[in-house]
Amino acid sequence: MIDLALLRDNPDLVKRSQQARGESPDTVDEAIEADRARRAAITAFEELRAAQNAHGKTVAAAPKEDKPALVAQAKELSDRVKAAQQAVTAAEEAADAALARIENIVIDGVPAGGEENFVTVRTHGQPASFDFEPLDHLALGEKLGAIDMERGTKVSGSRFYFLTGIGARLEYAIMSLALQRAVDAGFIPMIPPTLVRPEVMRGTGFLGQHADEVYKLEADDLYLVGTSEVPLAGYHMGEILDLTAGPKRYAGWSTCYRREAGSYGKDTRGIIRVHQFNKLEMFVYTTPEDAETEHLRLVALQEQMLQDLGLSYRVIDVAAGDLGSSAARKYDVEAWVPTQGAYRELTSTSNCTTYQARRLDVRHRPAVEGGGAGKTAPVATLNGTLATTRWIVALLETHQRADGSVVIPEVLRPYLGGLEVAEPIA
């Protein structure tokens, strides 16, 4: 959720942010009114409670002959208190619903508009070209014995697959390289749970407009995560962090699950858009003042990985209307996929400012002038992918040769026993 003081004191800023996202500014007025009604209901309840307490003392001190009338008044007052308490509950639920429609305030400079209104920040490398007809990643994967979509569908249904042989080894190699890079950069490696409670999924913002993409286990009231951002965001839920020594940085390696609702007919071939994949996710808790610097640091780590894998890519500043509800700014890094003649997202990184931390109650004590620590305040959270299954798509297509073999990038060879070229199987 956003800062309520900001909502009350600067509603025009919040409206501009909502409009940049393609949302109605009326959501802001509705949230302000719901917040006002909530506070009014709480005040009315507290006044009645105070009157009830005072009346109770009057009853206790009254003469015996006056007590029946006073007890009757106490009963009436008790009923009014109960009704006021119910009104508070209803007002709080209405306020929560209205505030949930207010998404994070976009950072100045984020382009307005929808998916197509992104701004290209920079490009790196020349798109791969060939003197032969290149194969797509699935055809290559089948020649190499790396991807088996047919049996994945037989076992689990559409958009499932097996990574086999060199395919499984490649994923392990990419993920292991990323994990080592993260550790070298000061991240604590984590293998988090992939089932989380509703309050954690809700707190990270994944039960809003993208709720239909999330798998839920109804019998257990648990959700399967689509990214380890979710459990890592919940890791310090309800805590006060010490950030005096710098940000807390974690790298979570997990299997991820997405229903891919609304993607019917899109990317049905191969492993670009699937229901299950592995991912190494960077997650950072820092001060709001340092969040933008940390954001650029995450992007730099992602770019270095793609450069070392020999991939051509572009970095885009995602438009406000294409941001998730928690992100105030997001950069996507998209690699060139030769057979599609297009850049496709391999990784993204988001600055969620204090939005998730407010919902999950993660705070720190900012230093105050003259030394010491002040009142607690929400931290800022950031996330960014450093490796995932989809990277195999760009890697196979970019480094293929005419005979269907694929040159292994040098940085991956130590994780593959020194293998330099993946050859087609007989």
Image (cartoon, helix red, strand yellow):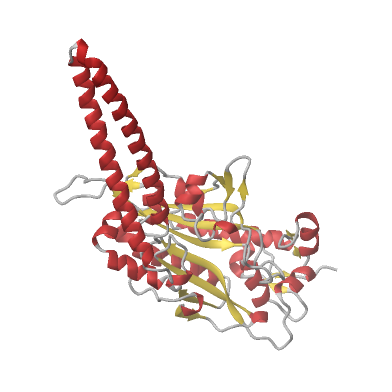
Among the 4 quarters of the image, the one containing residue 67 = top left
Q: Quarter of the image containing the N terminus?
A: bottom left
Residue appearing at x 71%, y 76% in the figure: 136
Q: Is residue 421 left or right of residue 111?
A: right
Residue most extreme to the top: 64
User: As rendered, which of 82 and 116 lies closer to the eye?
Assistant: 82
User: As rendered, which of 89 and 261 lies closer to the eye?
Assistant: 89
Residue appearing at x 48%, y 54% in the figure: 183
Q: Is residue 78 left or right of residue 276?
A: left
Vertical order, 11 against 35 (above or below): below
Residue most extreme to the bottom: 131
Vertical order, 299 against 200 (above or below): below
User: As rendered, which of 376 and 164 lies closer to the eye?
Assistant: 376
Residue most extreme to the left: 370
Q: Quarter of the image containing the C terminus?
A: bottom right
Q: Position of residue 271 (x, y in %)?
A: 68, 66
Whether residue 312 appears in this view of the structure is yes
User: As rendered, which of 65 and 2 lies closer to the eye?
Assistant: 65
Q: Position of residue 26 (x, y in %)?
A: 37, 66
Q: How many marks?
A: 0
Whether residue 239 appears in this view of the structure is no
Vertical order, 125 against 329 (above or below): below
Residue appearing at x 29%, y 38% in the figure: 45
Q: Position of residue 262 (x, y in %)?
A: 62, 66
Q: Is residue 237 left or right of residue 385?
A: left
Q: Position of residue 303 (x, y in %)?
A: 49, 70
